[in-house]
Amino acid sequence: MIKLPKTLQAATLLTASVLAAGLGASAAHAGTIVRHTNPGPAIILNGVTVPADAEWLMLSGQLASPIDPAKTEGMEAYGDTKTQTVSTFKKIEAALAKQGYAMSDVVKLTVFVVGDPKLGGKMDFAGFNAGYREFFGTAANPNLVARSTVQVAALAGPQFLIEIEATAAKVPAAPMRKKK
């Protein structure tokens, strides 16, 4: 064992205390998902910082369900971009719930939009955003997400205008401390 002078012992103890306090503060902050906003009136985030202790769920791309389950042929059976967006988000919401997550846990979306023939082959970005706004930035779910939206030539079936991949993250609850 090395014998240190008392002043060096005190300085070492003080340094260790300061470091421990700083690490404790970092550990507390490390358990928080930070959503980096854009200047208003943006409806998406600039980015998200997710701590190392978070639990992740990455959903495969989801497609709309038919408006009437008995009719599955043609784009009309699935509706326009907004209708398909709402249907797809409802499927995402159900898939998240099945795994113990909520729409408020979603941190990132990747959205593939096919050009709508009724719009001359251009994607209906306004229709997508209208459906998106029913699920994010609402009173029920004030959270926004980081998001990429791209127009693609086609999806898995000719009736689909939208496919959405969702990534969710949540920080596990701190364990309960026993009362003495």
Image: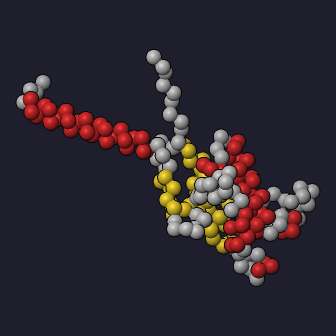
Q: Write down the quadrant of residue 75 in the picture.
A: bottom right
The picture places residue 61, in percent across and down from the top left corner, at: 68, 57
**Which of the pair 10/72 is nearer the observer?**
10
Residue for point 61% across, 52% down: 106
Q: Is residue 58 visible?
A: no
Q: Quadrant of residue 73?
A: bottom right
The structure residue drawn at horizontal position 23% and vertical position 36%, both measured from the top left corner, is 16
Q: How is the image coloured?
A: secondary structure
In-front residue for pair 78/18: 18
Residue 179, image x, y percentages = 48, 20
Farthest residue in the left direction?
Answer: 5
For residue 165, side relative to residue 38 (left or right): right
Q: Is residue 111 above or below residue 12?
A: below
Q: Nearer the viewer, residue 123 or 71?
A: 123
Which residue sits furthest front? 139
Q: Which quadrant does the C terminus fall into? A: top left
Q: Nearer the viewer, residue 29 or 118?
A: 29
Q: Compared to 37, does 5 lie above or below? A: above
Can residue 179 be seen?
yes
Q: Farthest residue toward the bottom?
A: 120
- In this picture, residue 128 sits left or right of residue 24: right
Q: Is residue 79 left or right of residue 173?
A: right
Measured along the vertical axis of the image, is residue 15 above or below residue 108?
Answer: above
Q: What residue appears at the point 54 percent right and 62 percent down from the top-left corner?
A: 45
Q: Position of residue 131 (x, y in %)?
A: 73, 63
Question: To which quarter of the image does residue 142 belong?
Answer: bottom right
Residue 20's x, y, as percent? 30, 37
Q: Quadrant of the N terminus?
A: top left
